[in-house]
Amino acid sequence: MVENRRYRNLVAYLVLGMGVAIVAFPVYLAIIASTFDAGTIANGNMPLVPGDQAGINYERALFTGGRLAREPVGMMMMNSFIMAMGIAIGKIIISILSAFAVVYFSFPFRRTAFWVIFITLMLPVEVRIYPTYKIVADLGLLDTYSGLILPLIASATGTLLFRQFFMTVPDELLEASKIDGAGPFRFFKDTLLPLSITTIAALFVIQFIYGWNQYLWPLLITTQSSMQTIVIGIKKMITTQDALTEWQIAMTTAVLAMVPPVMVVIFMQRLFVKGLVETEK
Amino acid sequence: MEKRALFSNKLLPYLLIFPQLAITLIFFYWPASQAVWQSFLLEDAFGLSSEFVGFENYRLLFQQPEYYRAMVTTAVFSSAVAILSLSCALLLASQADKNLKAGHAIKTLLIWPYAVAPAIAGVLWIFMFHPTLGTLARPIKGAGVDWNPMLNANHAMLLLILSATWKQISYNFLFFLAGLQAIPKSVIEAAAIDGSGPIRRFWTIIFPLLSPTTFFLIVVNIVYVFFDTFGIIDAVTGGGPAGRTTTLVYKVYADGRLGGDLGGSAAQSVILMIIVIALTAVQFRFVERKVQY
């Protein structure tokens, strides 16, 4: 534009640099804390460069756990991983099938079925926690992976996303497959599924992060510590009685809890952005 | 919009839609209707029997000063987070929209906090501002402020607002950047040729053209603060000190915990459902029409 470009870019880099620094600082501090012993952190003068206790802290967190939440963090991460994968894969399967039905078949109550699913878009699990808890308890699903996963995949985002995508698939493709004598299964497997790969991957990325970061629901339905997810586990490591909190282990666990979803965002950025933008609109 | 060509199987579509419908009915409609039904019941102290009491739970709820306080807390919390995170994100996005060489790297460096769990974000911020060992609490105390978010409700609220904002900036940034990149460059160039400076161009052209994105984000941010910040509140303050950071959602959880006041908790759930449905309806109605293009 007409303004001096060099000056303009300097301002931009300055503002963005500050933004990046502010965004990164809390995490930087957590990484630093995970490399010191309890005493150094507790005296309130933790240095801003890494210490030499990282090996000890990470080993202890992963395989033994803190003093308060006695479970090894490695196991909590396994639970989180199973839950996140279950939510992502489960949601993709049920929603791609239902979207296929709604878009490619004409059947009585098609509109009704669509609306029944669509309404769920509006109400997150938080507003119906206790009744949902009771149902999961009645079904005997407390402290199970199914109990962690199923209530969280009861929502319409995936179905809407696939429906939207199927609508953009040209009708000629279906007509051509029909002429070739393909039935619904063949068409789904050989035509629709290969076309949907990017959409599936984008939904997977978003749902994995959503699942990994769940808090309220696992907090309610896991009573055994062996079923805890890492996000719940870290909360238990921090008590109001300061003397008992092992901050070095808590911050090590925080770093471990951030690694998988952050890696997903960084390395699958394009899919992540696509998923985020399309599931919201 | 309908497809021209369709399959004509009779049973198959029902089989395909069955898993989703079953899960939705069992884990969504059944509990949601139970919440509505329970809000009209009063359980005895042992949970053995319950009787239909009509709107009694709602009447009791609206007599509680704590409920009004939770409303005020929620309003303050959500407006502060929305205003703060939207303005920071817009500032960053407008700078990132300048075709910089390091643009892509900067974008990556700004969006990853989206992946941090709210509860973890809360833990990171307590650690920074912990009254005895927090790295950033020291300069505040050094300046003579008796900083203690564990005891001082205003400090606790401030800490919640900062951590919730920190986590939400990345989301708003992404959507603002997409919105900015969708504005045709020719419009902005035309204004520049007519002699309007960057600030004037921003407020008279870019900001109005961005209003659909802004409006969409305002609604999303309010819903975010209502529900997703549960983890932050539970990790940072646990609703305290003395219930002063208890939001509406946190109160639903706290009141119903351990089989406490289930009727009252259900009544609060129903009110929340109405609020969210209203917000969503507002979004669907106004996002496309009323906002100026």
Image (cartoon, coloured by chain):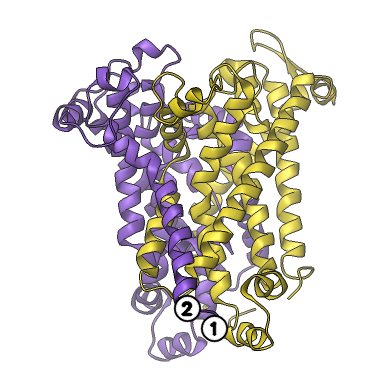
- The chain letter under disc 2 is A
Numbered mark located on residue A5 in the image: 2
Q: Residue at x 66, y 22 (%)?
A: B244
Image coordinates for residue B53, horizontal then vertical, percent: 83, 20
Which quadrant is the C terminus of chain B positioned in?
bottom right
- Chain ID for label 1? A
Chain identifier, purple in the render: A
Q: Amino acid at mark 2?
A: Arg
Determine the residue positioned at 59% across, 64% down: A281
- Are dots 1 and 2 in contact, CB under 8 Å? yes
Quarter of the image for residue B108 reads bottom left
**As displayed, is residue B148 above or below residue A12?**
above
SS category of the residue bearing label 2: helix
Q: Is residue A140 left or right of residue B223?
A: left
The answer to whether residue B91 of the structure is visible from this angle is yes
Instruction: Judge whether A154 appears above or below B163 on screen.
Output: below
Of the chain colours in the picture, the one used for chain B is yellow
| Above-or-below relation of A85 to B155 | below
Question: Residue B96 location in percent, x, y?
Answer: 48, 67
On the image, the x and y values in percent for residue A197 come to 36, 70
Residue A252 visible (yes or no) = no
Q: Nearer the viewer, residue A10 or A161?
A: A10
Residue A139 image position (x, y, % from top left): 48, 31
Q: Which residue is mark 1?
A: A1
Q: CA distance from mark 1 to mark 2?
A: 8 Å
Kind of residue at badge 1: Met
